[in-house]
Amino acid sequence: MTRHTLPAPGAIPADALRTVVDGRWAHVRQETREQLAAAELHPDPDLSSAEYRARITDALKVLTASGRPQSGFDPSVGGDGDVGGVVTAFAMLAYGDLSLLVKAGVQWGLFGGAVQVLGTERHHERYLRPIIDGDLLGCFAMTEAGHGSDVQHLHTTATYDPATREFVVHTPYPQARKTYIGNAARDGRMAVVFAQLITGEHRPGVHAFLVPIRDADGRPAPGVIIGDDGRKAGLNGVDNGRLSFEQVRIPRENLLDRFAGVAEDGTYSSPIENGTARFFTMLGTLVRGRISVAGGAGGAAQKALALAVRFGERRRQFSDPSTGEEIAVLDYLAHQRKLLPALATTFALHFTQDDLVARMHAIQAPGSGPAGAREQRTLEQSAAGIKAVATWHATHTIQTCREACGGAGYLEENLLPALKADTDVFTTFEGDNTVLLQLLAKELLADYGRTIKKGNPLQIAPLAGRQLAGVLAERTGAASLARRLPWRGLDLTDRGRRRTLLETRRADTLATAVRHLAPALRTGNDEFAVFNDAQDLLLVAARAHVDVLVETSFREAVEAVREPGVRALLERVYDLHVLSVIDRERAWYLQTGRLTAAEARSVRPLVNELCGELRPYARTLVDAFGIPENRLACPMLDDEAWAPAPGK
Amino acid sequence: MTRHTLPAPGAIPADALRTVVDGRWAHVRQETREQLAAAELHPDPDLSSAEYRARITDALKVLTASGRPQSGFDPSVGGDGDVGGVVTAFAMLAYGDLSLLVKAGVQWGLFGGAVQVLGTERHHERYLRPIIDGDLLGCFAMTEAGHGSDVQHLHTTATYDPATREFVVHTPYPQARKTYIGNAARDGRMAVVFAQLITGEHRPGVHAFLVPIRDADGRPAPGVIIGDDGRKAGLNGVDNGRLSFEQVRIPRENLLDRFAGVAEDGTYSSPIENGTARFFTMLGTLVRGRISVAGGAGGAAQKALALAVRFGERRRQFSDPSTGEEIAVLDYLAHQRKLLPALATTFALHFTQDDLVARMHAIQAPGSGPAGAREQRTLEQSAAGIKAVATWHATHTIQTCREACGGAGYLEENLLPALKADTDVFTTFEGDNTVLLQLLAKELLADYGRTIKKGNPLQIAPLAGRQLAGVLAERTGAASLARRLPWRGLDLTDRGRRRTLLETRRADTLATAVRHLAPALRTGNDEFAVFNDAQDLLLVAARAHVDVLVETSFREAVEAVREPGVRALLERVYDLHVLSVIDRERAWYLQTGRLTAAEARSVRPLVNELCGELRPYARTLVDAFGIPENRLACPMLDDEAWAPAPGK
């Protein structure tokens, strides 16, 4: 990349910028914008949970009528197969009410998605049409009170009874109850329940079952105990609840049997012999949920920044001693450093998300052919890492935007509180972020050593541990060598140098984790202790890996831009993002000798300079997301509130 | 400090630990605990704002009956003069409902406090008794929509009319309306209104006026327009609202005239001639509010940690491959690193807060004699810095605790959501944290240069700027010298070395800011631009200053402990806190050559080791705060929920 000349803010062609930001699913984005612009506005924040839930259930019907939900399903079941489009549109619901986003995600993404990818023709024929049409609302009942991250070890059981050809679904003790289940407390009629399958002496692990939970009148089905999770920090338009089962009988056909079946006589069969492999294959098909959450987090961060930038341009505080004029708060360096690097990273994640969606689309869309195991696995790795990074970024960014708007940011009428509260759970649902990053790190180790056992990120068999030790020992030498490569001499204004710094960190943090793990594993130490002692190093390695994924997506997107003004602007946004990453990790670069002290000290003025340079374009940049004006309208941005003082 | 031997968790004497943690106002803490244990429990989180406000107004009456509110007022007005005690008790209200804490703070701290310290005998006699007794509820109407941080430049006016001997209070345009005012939307009958005093041609700045806003039946007074701020992110039991004034007439006597008076003929007089000095003297008397907020933030962080540590000990996830037993999440290093350094810093801030309260008590309590300007000023500096650091710490810690409890932490029934939402505004009210740290930095520069003009942190007169340049230039040489002092050779396990690192950083970051400012000011550059370019450096210097204040308070508290087990435990908590600060600032230490790369790399294992060492004491430590059990009781910690699996 060369450094293009930046035209004045007014000379940046907004349409060309929008086109770049909109990317491949631009038509879907435009359509969703129009729907959002036409739909009902923010609900009264003082609604009771009951009223709010009713409102969101109504909104779900409006969404059904738009035809969008069916576009993500396979053409074989009446859908359009536009996997990428539906995930893109879903993420944009974050510009509106996040309760609707999550409710839609539960209904069509999780519940409908599970029926589609884990079920077979008989399930598709019977259930998918009413699911798409919103006539059959349902739950995705995986998480239990005692098992959220470690879903392979759920305690709910589904025991096959050959006498009646039924499964008996049962909750054996309190921590095994399903909880935080959307659609459970009010609307759901059926649930996809994940339970340990038992047939005779055989216990082949967790499988998914369709369990009716309410009758047509909404009364709980016999043996199904439904609880309400009650008020939550946010998302109170979603009826999260609890499900327990007292020996609930369901027909044998209600096993979602794409990956495993139970014959009438109770014989279990599966095309995937290994139980762990089978379970993770089932889970892998559900990757769409994780990618959707990352997208929703991105939309929420974009909206928060759009609000805070607009406010920061209007709100003035303290006078310039030379002119006596009050200064817009966004003209303060401290305010710029709060918002602009966050905005740069939001752009970076936006392009990363688009790439992730395209990769998923290539695997999952009709006609894409069977996915290679390798593509599927790297997609899952990327989804885990990007979900963690994108949702933490959203949480931090929305918090910063709230604070940047002061007291106004604390009022519900100004939209930031709901953004914060509604997205807060994104960091721990669809996979706890810390666990996801560990999972990614273990996968990276596996790629590195090629011998580590897959599956539970903490379950490394002793043999694999020793094997790993040997392989890693060989590799360690190479990693140490790599540390001595010469790349001094170019300063941090050089894009290639900065990119190398990110890539070096990715390779080196992984090598460091390996160097800590290998000798300890070789000497036969307690495996839990060995991995636990390196847990922080694994998290660092995973984070560094994601940093490179994000940099790559952003760079490639910028390099593809032809319009010179847009290119020049996005280059600087890219620069600010990458420098922010280096700034965040300065300590690591210094203590590994990757940066000299003088270089590290040069980061601050470079970041400040970019903030100053981008300040006049802040509004152009947040406008590029194309968030409908009615979704940003709020009293703190209302023109009337800003009527000038008399005599001004 | 030497390193004492740490006894087993069971051998730490809980009473001795509690005595140390309770400190000087132990009796007040014990009494408040008993009140909290006896009082009504958590409100239904699904209450409407109207219901919740009514509930908190009732709770305020219960608090009145406890006699605690009057203990903070002067004996001359029927109080007990226990300034430190009342602030200590106030902070502990954070263990309960934070809406009650804020409502109490508005009524007795801000409204009552302003009448006491800004008013004179006639105001005290007439108003303080009904204020203390909760018969006259009132507002502290300082903040305007357009002026929060820069309260010296409020736009509300109070113009004296000698013909009727009245002040005419007026809101000239929308951004001058008072907003976020507690007690305004529902309960307040009167407000202390801060407005620009105008008498004839004279405009001597902002003064405080008592303005009736509602009649006895609750109807708005003539000319007073009352709005409702509506639902907020949290604190919905507090009736925040907006006040505008349409030429509202109040008697001359309603000027709170301790620092300035207007005679019947309109002649203005004040013992403090300089307008800026007068205004900041008035503001300085209100330091108690800022200190109280820091205390409340501390209480909220303690409660969040108590909840998360208890949950982290019970909740298990993933099996140990050697034993097959599931592992408590607090046994994972990553989980320890989330909670234990935050817990250590919470202890550090607890002792810092106690020192701050004692310093305030020494100045404000009856019989303490007139405060020296220097003591008052350093108290204000410390209060500004500690308020910023303590409230950000609370926000981050509560967020971390919420995430550490996963889905359970997102449910209102488990108390973390309200803690987060209610305290979120603490970072921006009673002084925006970023502005407070800048203010502190400017004060530190003033101490450094002794010539900088006081007042508005951005308003440095050209003369002061040039004066500053000269003085700073001299000092710069000395600062550079100091950088070359030898202190290498001791490693980071040495407490003295670590303490030196914190102190060095304080001195050096300030010197760095000076080195950036001095030449630019000397060459007569635009002052706003000069200070703005160094804004990030000023914030760093302020933060480093507070780090030393906190370290000092914690160290002195630990050094005073006689009981060897408690001493040994708190020494390690102190170590973890100080190492966390060094860890956070590793990049700075490396790039200034204060730490070698090898030393910086040694921080991680030291922090991890301390986390491991303190893990078994986590429960002992959170229990030491003495939070009443009924305030921690919640479903996620309920014994019944943890009934074991069958056969276990």
Image (cartoon, coloured by chain):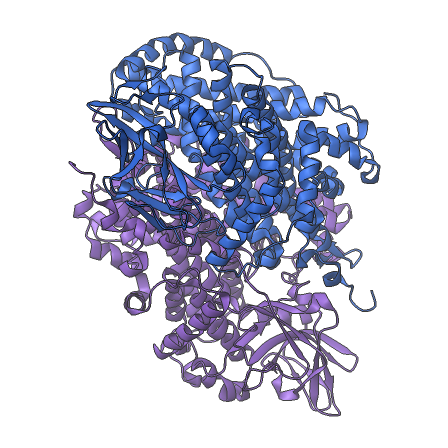
Chain colours: A purple, B blue
Please provide percent x and percent y for residue A38.
28, 69
Of the pair A90 and A78, the residue shown nearer to us: A90
Q: Which residue is painted at 56% across and 80% down in the image?
A: A190
Q: Is residue B332 visible?
A: no
Q: Is residue A32 visible?
A: yes
Please provide percent x and percent y for residue A590.
51, 31
Quadrant of image for the N terminus of chain A: top left
Please provide percent x and percent y for residue B128.
49, 33
Q: Which residue is painted at 28% across and 57% down in the image?
A: A20
Of the pair B259 and A164, the residue shown nearer to us: B259
The answer to whether residue B129 is left or right of residue B195 is right
Quarter of the image holding residue A351?
bottom left
Quadrant of image for the C terminus of chain A: top left
Please provide percent x and percent y for residue B446.
40, 16
Q: Which residue is painted at 29% across and 47% down in the image?
A: A310
Question: B130 above or below A303?
Answer: above
